[in-house]
Image (cartoon, rainbow, N blue to C red):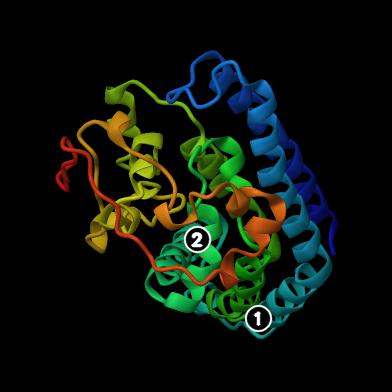
Amino acid sequence: MDALMHTVSTWRTISSLSWLAILLVWETAAPYFTFFVGGNKARAGHGLKNMTLGILNSIFTSLAFIALWWMTSQWANSHAFGILNWLSLTGWARLIFAFLLFDAWMYWWHRFNHRIPFLWRFHRTHHSDPKMDVTTANRFHIGEIAISSVLRIPVIALIGLHLWELALYEIAMFTVVQMHHANIAFPAWLDRVLRMVIVTPFMHKVHHSRWQPETDSNYSSLFSFWDRVFRTFRLRQDPRTIHYGLEEFDQPENHTLIGLLATPVRQVQRQTGEPAPSAQVNDSH
């Protein structure tokens, strides 16, 4: 793979780890929810399990899929195949459209994970976390990563992506994903301004609510406007009343590393959860 791809991959790793460190410090200094008061050992254990899943997933995709994505990208661009090539876009216009098209796919992929029972079995590993923090951004089942990685092959071809464009998108996307999973909050006015374009902490906290109408909303990963376009946008009047996790996975054994890996095979009935008395939906912001 070319030198540009190597450089982008290096910066992706550096930016991800640097932003993780910043958000961990922020969560420690000013946590939105006091999950781990006086319990640094519990917090470390929680984070270690989530990060272990992330590391395993990263190794898996590196070994099994990056070469396939690269070959697909090379084929699409050498044959002038894909939307970006059909439109003959270049420069910034091409990069912007690449981001928009792939982010639209990410919105629908996320939505499919909630609406298709087989996919939800894997995705509930992510949603079962009752103490969401920045490490939850890494808490995905390897089965979900495998399915997503396979489906990326035709998506890369259809869009006509260069692999470095995908890597740049992932730097931007994961930066936002880490931020909106973190146990932090912006001032209300700033969150309101930012969520006109990107997904914010107040917006994504609603998505991790255990009340199913809220869980099944706010599917956007990077750009927030997909939820407005497709009418899946929700806000909670008071985010502090949100309870994270999935009721059917509250038992401690479901939150060990083995339990997380076994989540897809657990035979449980999905619970809808109950909203707090102050829970309100607001689609106008």
Q: Nearer the viewer, residue 212 or 187?
A: 212
In the picture provided, is 4 more to the left or to the right than 209? right
Measured as percent of width and height from the top left, residue 186 is found at 39, 24
The label number, if any, that marks residue 76 in the structure image: 1
Q: Position of residue 237 (x, y in %)?
A: 20, 34
Q: Is residue 91 visible?
A: yes
Query: Which quadrant of the structure image shows residue 45?
Result: top right
**At which x and y percent is residue 228?**
24, 55
State whether residue 139 appears in this view: no
Name which residue type carries label 2. Answer: Arg
Taking depth in this image into account, of 233 and 198 the one nearest to the observer is 233
Q: At 80% from the left edge and 45% from the top edge, which residue is drawn?
A: 10
Amino acid on which disc 1 is placed = Ala
Mark 1, residues whose alpha carbon is within 10 Å: few (<14), some, or many (≥20)? Answer: many
The secondary structure type at the circle numbered 1 is helix
Q: Residue at x 53, y 50 (%)?
A: 251
Q: Is residue 216 above or below residue 268?
A: above
Residue in the picture at 84% in, 61% down: 2
Q: Secondary structure at mark 2?
A: helix
Q: Is residue 275 above or below residue 120?
A: above
Residue highlighted by disc 2: 124
Distance of mark 2 from mark 1, alpha carbons? 34 Å
Q: Please tell me which residue lies in front, 150 or 116.
A: 116
Answer few, some or many: residues within 10 Å of disc 2's Cα (few below 14, many 20 plus, some between 14 and 19): many
Query: What percent of the width, then of the height, locates residue 28?
Result: 58, 18
